[in-house]
Image: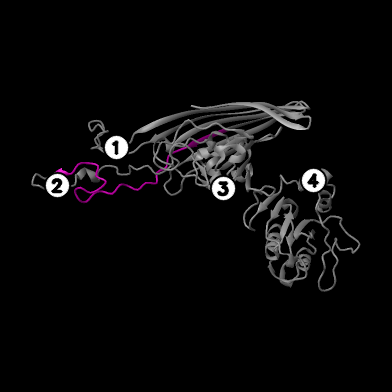
Amino acid sequence: MSVQAAHASEAHTTEVEVSFKVDRQRASEGILEFAEQAQVSVLFERKLVGPHYTNEVRGDYSVEDALLVLLTETGLKGRLTETGTLIIGRCENCVDVEGNNGMKTNNKRGTLRAALLTSAAAFASILPSGASAQDAAAATSTEDILIVTGVRGEPRSVIDSPIPIDVFSSEMLERIPGTGGLFEQLRYNVPSLNLPQRAGGGTATFIASAGLRALNPDQTLVLVNGKRRHKTSLINTSTGLFSGSAGVDLNMIPNSAIDRVEVLRDGAAAQYGSDAIAGVVNIILKEAPEGGFLTATRGQNFDRNDGEFFNFGANGGFALGDNGFVNVSFDYRQNEGSERASPVPIPTEPGASFRFFPDVDNMDGTFSVDPREALVNRTVRNFGEYPSERYSFAINAAYDFGDVEAYSFATYTDRSSTLFFTFRRPRDGRNNGEIFPNGFIPEEEIREDDFEVVAGLRGTTAGFDWDLSGGYGRNI
């Protein structure tokens, strides 16, 4: 479902005329443009209106009359509720006593006869023929209704919540060609998520650190299937961003296992505790009992022909008896390094900055720049992606015994990466000039094992929902 949220004006839902300029276009875009100009809220299902085109509407009309012009002979039907909400559906076998698809017209302008639709049963009148009551109830479920703040972009927020909750499906995330994992894909969708390419020096360059609302990563609560996720063992000890934090590394969860991601972009410490000061990220794993997919992506940076990456993902679902499922996933990611640093300038005067070698004493009281400065590789700063390789596995399973449901999920990731430290100049006390006469860049190999398993039982007893579970997680 798609909901266009606009400030409804009571005057615009009566006989006050509005100046409309809506071109003929696909119904999904035309309806949103119409609602924005009419200043009314609109509710429709994209899949149903997708193949239709709306008519051109130009001139001064009341909202009811303009709606008639917009939808006449389009195969769509619209109803305007007393609360100013416009509901659009496909018109199939819905002729009323006036004989014009539920709309009463005259030669000049028509008057749309709208009934107040406040229930799933009423909404069923504009669902496709043959749709069941369950389909109607599902179509109006608040869990499936999304809100859009403008006519551009896709709907993604739950409307039935006092705080905005962004919901990103796996399809939405897959459209982002991320090479680094889940965090990188989220940063293009969540406006308050801060994910620097490198949060600082040392191991901070290796941790996928991200913070909501400019707070540290460990002040954002991360859940998997509603259960707390363990944190990384690498502490950000740099003097850059997020210093002193140890957040959850979302890149340890395979993307192919994710069904959707829910992001609460506001403080929730009163409900969840102090680790949710910045907000909550809840990752829901796939539960499909059948089907699956394979996906592969390969590419590199076109400007310098570096940063080559290869991503592979696989997912499959299997039925577990008549009332259960097992869903398994595997991801493989390989990233080569990239470099975006400029060469360190060659000093032109003795005593200038960026000198790799001591100035040459001319034995006459003057000094000159060492000629070796122009001969060595001066691209020694590290601005770019570090090489890494990652294997990730996930399993999600459940079985319903009737009164009690047993469930479990687990993830395992093995990741290795090469970390480059600060360049040691030839005259640096930390360098052995006999071994590295031109200086060197230290390299550190980081190998990481990450594991989590959760199991539990849930059900309903005496009218109360209960959930008993235990989890174990580690990051080495």
> Does the segment drawn in magenta span residue 384?
no
User: The residue under label 3 is which amino acid type?
Assistant: Val
- The Cα–Cα distance between marks 4 and 2, rounded to whole angstroms, is 85 Å
Q: Which residue is mark 1?
A: 424
- The magenta segment: 331-360
**Residue 267 sits above or below residue 2 on the image:** above
Q: Which residue is mark 4?
A: 137
Q: 233 or 214: nearer the eye?
A: 214
Identified at 41% across, 36% down, the residue is 237
User: The residue under label 1 is which amino acid type?
Assistant: Arg
Q: Position of residue 339 (x, y in %)?
A: 40, 44
Q: Which residue is mark 3?
A: 190
Identified at 86% across, 57% down, the residue is 94
- The Cα–Cα distance between marks 2 and 1, rounded to whole angstroms, is 23 Å
Lower position in the chain sequence, tag 4 or tag 1: 4
Lower position in the chain sequence, tag 4 or tag 2: 4
Q: Position of residue 463 (x, y in %)?
A: 78, 32
Q: Residues within 10 Å of mark 2 (few under 14, many from 20)?
A: some
Q: 76 or 157: nearer the eye?
A: 157
- The Cα–Cα distance between marks 3 and 4, rounded to whole angstroms, is 30 Å
Q: 140 or 27: nearer the eye?
A: 140
